[in-house]
Image (tube, rainbow, N blue to C red):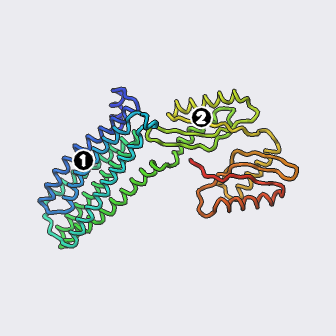
């Protein structure tokens, strides 16, 4: 229902994809500020009355959550700035930086809660119990669950990593508040006064690891991570839809922030095709990918020999040997140069990221296999890893 409401909200205003992404990010920030300010006030009052360190820590966390919402707004606005002379690829990665700041607030919450919990374990105190406190905290969980769900919907629609971080922060609040209710119940039903501190410490650890997950996701985008299988398939399908393109390899995708993706790829084409004709085909492919996938791509032409029985036989031999060694191995840019004493097989070998074998060990193993089949074969092989 929320998803349909958001879609209708965007359609009625006829926003572009980029404009709706920015406005939804800002809307999430404003909504978060209002909700967190309300929750902070309620929890601070309940924590002061009950003397519960978990509740007051929760209140402070809600105040910091309002700060994360401000960071979300600022990050969304800055990331949407257009390209300029100093930043020809735009400012999209500022969104990732702002998400790192949000994750810092998650770690801060974990540290402060752990510190307060340890103090509570060392110096336990009585916690006053009232059913209305439970009701208020339960209502706070419901609000935070709604905020988490709301930001989850927005994240799916925008892929704004800030909203994913805010969603996780809201879920952390639900865990912390739920643990607080458990601590209140245990303290009221038993004489175990350290329950509040122990449960708070456990929650701090859970929140810390949740923060690590968010940071790992953000750093992956900043450092460079493989593109999605869907995107790779989309690029390859468009390229292979052209009859003159017989293979695709060395696809590299650079992510400069949402909506700012630049890619390059090698297209294998028959060596007998007219160069002007194939240049026109590749131009059309680049334009089609740009239009349908919103990606700037540069396609390099790799002429290869096709319909040659001898070359095809050596290709088949290479494929069989690689399958024997590792079915994850693949090759491209295959060429054969036949001489009076030996035959050079030239190709690029794509191997998985395997720490057990070095490139030299793989090549030695490969050469031995070929020598078993034909003593006159000489390999000229470049070992590489896939970028996708």
Quadrant in which the N terminus appears: top left
Q: In the image, 379: left or right of 91?
A: right
Nearer the observer, disc 1 or disc 2? 1
On the rendered structure, is 320 left or right of 153? right
Q: Residue at x 18, y 47 (%)?
A: 38
Q: CA distance from mark 1 to mark 2?
A: 45 Å
Work out whether residue 87 or residue 372 is closer to the camera in this orientation and state it: 87
Q: Is residue 184 left or right of residue 202?
A: left
Residue beneath disc 1? 66
Secondary structure, mark 1, is helix
Q: Residue furthest front?
A: 86
Up the image or down, 311 lies above or below 277; here it is: below
Label 2: which residue?
238
Q: Say above or below: 142 vs 154.
A: below
Q: Residue furthest right?
A: 340
Determine crowd level at label 1: few under 14, some 14-19, many 20+ residues with C-alpha closer than 10 A: many
The picture places residue 189, in percent across and down from the top left corner, at: 18, 69
């Amino acid at each position: 229902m929320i998803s349909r409401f958001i879609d209708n909200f965007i359609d009625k205003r006829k926003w572009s994809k980029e404009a709706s992404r920015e406005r939804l990010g800002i809307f999430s920030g404003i909504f978060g500020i209002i909700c967190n300010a309300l929750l902070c006030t309620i929890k601070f009052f309940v924590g002061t009355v009950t003397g519960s360190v978990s509740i007051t820590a929760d209140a402070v966390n809600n105040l910091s959550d309002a700060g994360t919402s401000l960071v979300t707004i600022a990050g969304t606005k800055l990331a949407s700035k257009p390209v300029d002379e100093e930043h020809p690829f735009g400012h999209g990665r500022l969104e990732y930086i702002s998400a790192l700041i949000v994750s810092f607030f998650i770690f801060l919450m974990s540290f402060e809660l752990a510190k307060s919990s340890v103090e509570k374990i060392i110096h336990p105190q009585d916690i006053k119990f009232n059913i209305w406190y439970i009701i208020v905290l339960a209502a706070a969980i419901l609000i935070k669950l709604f905020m988490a769900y709301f930001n989850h919907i927005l994240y799916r629609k925008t892929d704004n990593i800030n909203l994913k971080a805010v969603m996780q922060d809201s879920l952390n609040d639900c865990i912390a508040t739920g643990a607080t209710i458990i601590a209140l119940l245990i303290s009221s039903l038993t004489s175990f006064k350290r329950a509040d501190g122990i449960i708070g410490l456990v929650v701090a650890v859970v929140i810390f690891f949740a923060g690590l997950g968010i940071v790992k996701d953000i750093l992956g985008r900043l450092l460079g991570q493989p593109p999605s299988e869907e995107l790779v398939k989309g690029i390859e399908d468009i390229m292979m839809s052209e009859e003159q393109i017989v293979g695709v390899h060395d696809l590299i995708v650079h992510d400069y922030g949402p909506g700012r993706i630049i890619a390059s790829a090698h297209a294998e084409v028959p060596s007998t095709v007219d160069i002007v004709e194939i240049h026109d085909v590749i131009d059309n492919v680049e334009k089609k990918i740009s239009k349908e996938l919103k990606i700037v791509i540069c396609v390099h032409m790799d002429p290869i020999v096709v319909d040659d029985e001898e070359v095809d036989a050596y290709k088949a031999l290479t494929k069989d040997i690689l399958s024997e060694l590792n079915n994850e191995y693949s090759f491209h840019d295959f060429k054969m140069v036949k001489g009076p004493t030996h035959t050079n097989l030239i190709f690029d070998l794509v191997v998985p990221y395997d720490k057990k074998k070095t490139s030299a060990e793989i090549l030695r193993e490969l050469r031995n296999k070929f020598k078993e089949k034909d003593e006159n074969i000489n390999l000229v092989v470049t070992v590489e890893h896939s970028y996708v």
